[in-house]
Every structure is written in C-alpha cells, then in structure tokens.
Image: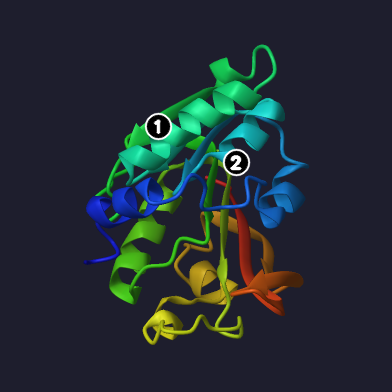
C-alpha cells in the first residue's frame, strides 16, 4: 500500500491504540515557547499532542492530518486531557497534504517530521510558507540526513532534508531566518538508544 494515502494512515492508526508518545515534539516546545500566541496550524498533527500543547499556551490551533482515524482519536484524547477553556481553542481538519492548498494564513505554521518524496516535499513546503501571515512564523522540523536510519526503509534518505534546503525555498526578501540548525538529542529507535539529528528551520515572514 502506498504510504502517502489516507487508507495507509487510517489502517496504521486503527491497528494500535496509540502510535506516538503523547508528548509534544521537543523542537516545537523549544522554539514556539517564546512566540506570542495567535492562530496556529499544525500540519500532520497525528494524535494531537502538539495541538494540545499549543492550545495550552494560548494558541487557537487547527490540527490538519490525512487520517480521519487519527483526527477522531486526537479530538477525543485532547478533549479528555484539556483544562477548562483549552478545548475551545482546538479544531481539526482532514486533508491530503499532497493536494492541500492553504486557504487562510496563520501566525504559526508547524510541520513536525513530515517526510515526503522530494518533488512532493518541495511543493508542500511552498504551501506551508504561503499559509504564514505577515509577521508570522514557519517552523519545519524533520530528520536530518545524518539521522540514524530505520531498518527496511531504503527510500528513507531521499525523504530526509536539511534546514538549509528548506531555507533555500524561501524568498529572502520576504523571510527572516531565525533558526537554521541540526541539533542532536537522545532518542530510542527500534528499542535501541541513538543520537537523533533533527533539521530545524524557524523563519518569520517579514512581508
């Protein structure tokens, strides 16, 4: 099955009660904590941990994902965990990122570990940038090419990227690069402790 289809992700989420850790992505916490809350779009929101974290910080957040199963789980689990008033700051949207077009602009657009074949990735990153309002921030985080590889994923290197590659897609007259880095962090992959290498791009739209 093509792993970029709604059917693939619906099946994957339906096969397990929980896939991800339930914790917000560390680079989101690190780099969004200092931003002034406004409207936010979390692209590829999965089970909703990042959406919940942002809503708790005061953001009005839309979680977007290809999987209706993931979105139903995210809405249910975040509603159960949310403090009074937080649930009202979260909404959910099902969309295929391969054909998605930005219909409005946000003060923060976050895409955490969204890996696609190169032609698709470049188009999607252009749409992510188009969804950022003037003065807003774009945060793209992924696995750097130096990140340890998963077994059985021969295509994986073609879908990894550097922060510099993301930055090159942004018009320098319209964007200010705040962070362009490849930080490391401890992680567990396939039961083994490894040193993860992230690609982190934080940029602010100036016009």
Apparent side of residue 119 relative to residue 125 in the rendered image (left or right) = left
Q: Which residue is mark 1?
A: 72
Apparent side of residue 193 relative to residue 177 in the rendered image (left or right) = right
Q: Residue at x 44, y 67 (%)?
A: 169
Comparing 5 with 124, the one in front is 5
Q: Residue furthest top?
A: 84
Comparing 17 with 152, the one in front is 17
The correct choice, above or below, for 202 with respect to 102 in the image is below
Of badges 1 and 2, the one in the foreground is: 1
The correct choice, above or below, for 165 with respect to 125 in the image is below
Residue 104 seen by the camera: no
Image coordinates for residue 130, horizontal then vertical, percent: 40, 48
Q: Which residue is mark 2?
A: 49
Comparing 19 with 143, the one in front is 19
Count neighbours of disc 2 (C-alpha within 10 A) and say few if under 14, some if 14 to 19, many if 20 or more. many
Which of the two labelled residues, at mark 1 and mark 2, occupies the earlier sequence position? 2
Apparent side of residue 202 relative to residue 117 in the rendered image (left or right) = right
């Amino acid at each position: 099955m093509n792993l970029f289809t709604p059917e693939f992700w619906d099946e994957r989420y339906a096969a397990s009660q929980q896939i991800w850790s339930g914790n917000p992505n560390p680079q989101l916490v690190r780099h969004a904590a200092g931003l002034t809350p406004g409207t936010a779009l979390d692209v590829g929101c999965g089970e909703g941990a990042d959406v919940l974290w942002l809503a708790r910080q005061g953001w009005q957040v839309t979680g977007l994902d290809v999987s209706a199963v993931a979105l139903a789980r995210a809405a249910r689990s975040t509603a159960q965990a949310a403090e009074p008033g937080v649930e009202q700051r979260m909404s959910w949207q099902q969309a295929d990122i391969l054909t998605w077009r930005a219909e409005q602009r946000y003060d923060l657009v976050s895409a955490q570990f969204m890996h696609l074949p190169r032609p698709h990735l470049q188009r999607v990153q252009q749409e992510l940038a188009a969804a950022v309002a003037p003065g807003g921030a774009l945060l793209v985080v992924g696995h750097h090419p130096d990140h340890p590889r998963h077994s059985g994923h021969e295509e994986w290197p073609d879908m990894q990227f550097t922060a510099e590659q993301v930055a090159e897609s942004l018009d320098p007259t319209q964007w200010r690069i705040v962070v362009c880095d490849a930080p490391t962090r401890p992680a567990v992959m396939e039961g083994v402790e490894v040193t993860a290498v992230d690609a982190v791009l934080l940029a602010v739209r100036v016009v």
